[in-house]
Image (cartoon, rainbow, N blue to C red):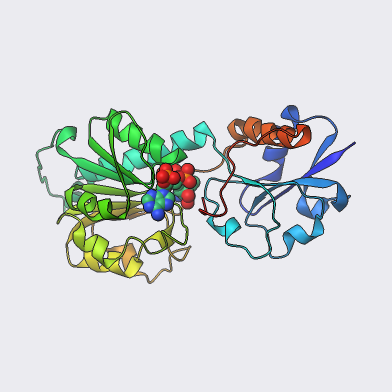
Amino acid sequence: MSDTLVFYSGPDPFEAWRDALAPHLPASTRIEQADAVTDPLSVRYALVWMPPEGFFERFPNLKLVINLGAGVDRLVARTDLPDLPITRLSDPNMGRMMAGFVLFSVLRHARDIPHFEAAQARRQWSYRHPRAAEETTVAVLGLGELGAMAASEIARQGFDTHGWATRERSLPGVSVHCGDAALAPLAARADIVVCMLPLTPATRQRLDADFFAAMKPGAAFINVSRGEVVDQDALVQSLQAGHLSGATLDVFATEPLPPDHPLWSLPGVLITPHLASVALPKSAAPQIAANIRAVQDGQPLANEVSRLRGY
Ligand code: NDP
């Protein structure tokens, strides 16, 4: 019996995903773009990134929704999502890309790069003596698939590395802190805070004015997860007041960040347009195909998302 995988994504090219997936799937499984589906009743699997409202209604025989990325906040928040298993991508190359971006961001602040860029703009030789990595404390908030890999990379560079999550876990080189009460003390000791928390009802605006006030004077803030985890106005105020020395921000409450937003021109702030990491067809295809085969064979799924937790 033939079945169909339907693909929908604005930014991701269909042909690249189709060509990466085809060798891993049975010949009887068709891979079709949403607007070219020939037999909607044969669609059993949906590989999607932000499909339009009402998308799932066309496919009453769906058995699995695969989120074309790591962040599932937009998918699980939908009111039209059928009651089906959802999986996310857990791709090591995506993790490496994220870990590389986070390491770059940490080094940017740890090595005072914003200071040198500002000095260069003034044609000024402005020496600042480098510190050993172990003298800089880095806190990674969120130790999930991507967060744990980034924290390990930071630890590997010799930074005094800490992490924050809901559950205890062992991560070599990383001191793990758990629970709400641990957040403010961690913020107070970190020179650099990296936000890698998923957006859920519990984390929305979790990094608020009190959090930024608790951060060490002169510390830097990095956000690569979701803008809505942060009270962006409180972040701006903290930067404007000079309480924070700078920030590296890849994600925002509103994307694209509006041209007149104050963050664009604050000293020490680097803005990138939500690209810290992306889903990579070649390395993600085997695990997507494995989950499709698991559905076909009635086997357990990998990388399943908890709708209750929201990640
Ligand atoms: P995971 O979903 O694998 O893990 C989430 C982590 O956050 C877990 O460690 C979890 O704790 C912790 N956490 C969740 N809620 C809380 C809470 N209320 N208090 C404390 N800790 C909490 O996430 P990933 O590491 O894979 O990815 C992180 C985020 O990165 C994604 O959700 C996505 O939004 C973003 N992302 C951004 C990209 C970009 O280009 N900028 C690209 C890809 C992803 P526990 O371990 O106890 O469950």
Q: In front here: 195 or 240?
A: 195
Q: In front here: 111 or 287?
A: 287
Residue 152, placed above or below residue 122: above
In the image, is 111 to the left or to the right of 21? left
| Residue 311 image position (x, y, % from top left) | 51, 50
Q: In front here: 261 or 281?
A: 281
**Residue drawn at (69%, 33%) of the image:** 289
| Residue 130 image position (x, y, % from top left) | 13, 37
| Residue 308 image position (x, y, % from top left) | 54, 55
Residue 159, placed above or below residue 251: above
**Residue drawn at (18%, 40%) of the image:** 136
| Residue 116 image position (x, y, % from top left) | 19, 47
In the image, is 71 to the left or to the right of 17? left
Whether residue 276 can be seen here: no
**Residue drawn at (28%, 42%) of the image:** 106
Q: Quadrant of residue 282?
A: top right
Q: In front here: 256 or 99?
A: 99
**Residue drawn at (31%, 55%) of the image:** 180
Residue 285, placed above or below residue 36: above
Which quadrant, please, contains the N terminus? top right
